[in-house]
Amino acid sequence: MSDVMTRALTKAGADGLHEAAAAARAGRGSPSSPSFYDDVGKYIGAVPAPVRSIVDYYRMDGSSSVLVLSGLRVDAAGCGRTPLSWQEALADARQEQEEAQLALLAALLGEPFAWHTIQHGRMVQNLVPMEKERTAQSGHGSVALEWHTEDGFHEQRCRYLLLLGIRNPDEVPTTVASIRGVDLSEGHRAVLVQPRFLIRPDPEHLRHLATVSPGSEALRRAREMHDHPEPVAILFGRPDDPHLRIDAPYTTPVPGDREAAEALAAVVEQLEVAQRDVVVREGDVLILDNYRVVHGRRAFEPRFDGTDRWLKRISVRGRTGSLVTGGSRVV
Ligand SMILES: [Fe+2]
């Protein structure tokens, strides 16, 4: 994939980010809470200029869909053993220093936010394999996670998704493909920009909501989106350099629309071809432009013994977007 930007922090850059994160924790508390991100500006200002300029360049130049930033200071031993579930990690403060570094990078890109239905609204989520969820299409499964844009069915999906590696000794790859890497005919492009496709929330999302928030407005809305999805376009934005939203297993053409079915098959095939592996190792941050890339994960064999792959995730709205629902950070 040609539009991956790879940068390694210098020791001074990594130390400076680490210090800024420590100061932010002292001033703002835990990065797992929404209040950490209020008035975080002065701590962002303390991030070393060379680190800020890497992230600013990625965001403003726009020629790279993916940024791999390596060399963050992660104390994997101090973080503890890989938790066996996201629930186990909810109140664990041992990774706050790592989370605060991720949080500052996220805040450089825009407005970090969380879903109150995902991991109890924790701003930084833990992605760990769970024995009960081996076959789940989620960050807790260990079967291949099919490619998708994050929350593709949802209008309020993130612009950027950041993943920080706490440990990944088996080098389990994340998969990434950019819309810029696909070769589509003009005819297919013309169809893909029209609202002739349905993207349903995945059943996992609905099941999770039904468990954690039965009777909630969020569940009612998600069911509505599942039962009566609004037709949407897969490509949008600039025709010569489009954005996309798609979730491979849950995207269908509007029933009976053969042209849409053909165009969908073409873009799916092209994105398959464009898939590349990226291993998020300890101290790496993978930043994805969720309007330009799809991502997934290869299948792997977890041991569930505290040594498995462990990533931290945070979602960001772009700077041009505003916080929804009256300025709440957890939606
Ligand atoms: Fe995802």
Image (cartoon, rainbow, N blue to C red):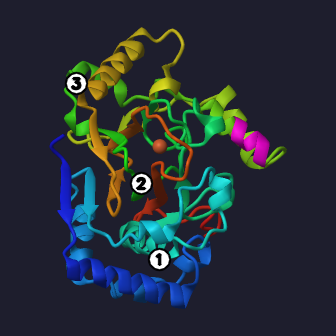
Farthest right residue? 215
In the displayed structure, would residue 288 be above or below residue 296?
Answer: below
Image position, residue 236 (x, y; %): 36, 39
Q: Earlier in the sequence, mark 1 or mark 2?
A: 1
- From the image, state whether disc 1 or disc 2 is nearer to you: 1
Does residue 189 appear in this view? Answer: no
Residue interval drawn in magenta? 207-212
Most prominent secondary structure in the magenta stretch?
helix
Where is mark 1, residue-wise? 97
Mark 2: secondary structure: loop
Report whether 302 appears left or right of 235. right
Residue 159 badge: 2
User: Residue 84, labelled with which disc?
Assistant: none
**Residue 12 against residue 258 in the figure, above or below:** below
Residue 49 within the segment the image draws in magenta: no
Residue lying furthest left in this view? 2
Which element carries disc 3, helix, strand or loop? loop
Q: Write the residue at 21% across / 74% down.
A: 53
Mark 1 residue element: helix
| Quadrant occupied by the N terminus | top left
Q: Which residue is mark 3?
A: 184
Q: Earlier in the sequence, mark 1 or mark 3?
A: 1
Determine crowd level at label 1: few under 14, some 14-19, many 20+ residues with C-alpha closer than 10 A: many
Report the quarter where the C terminus lies.
bottom right
- The amino acid type found where label 1 is placed reads Gln
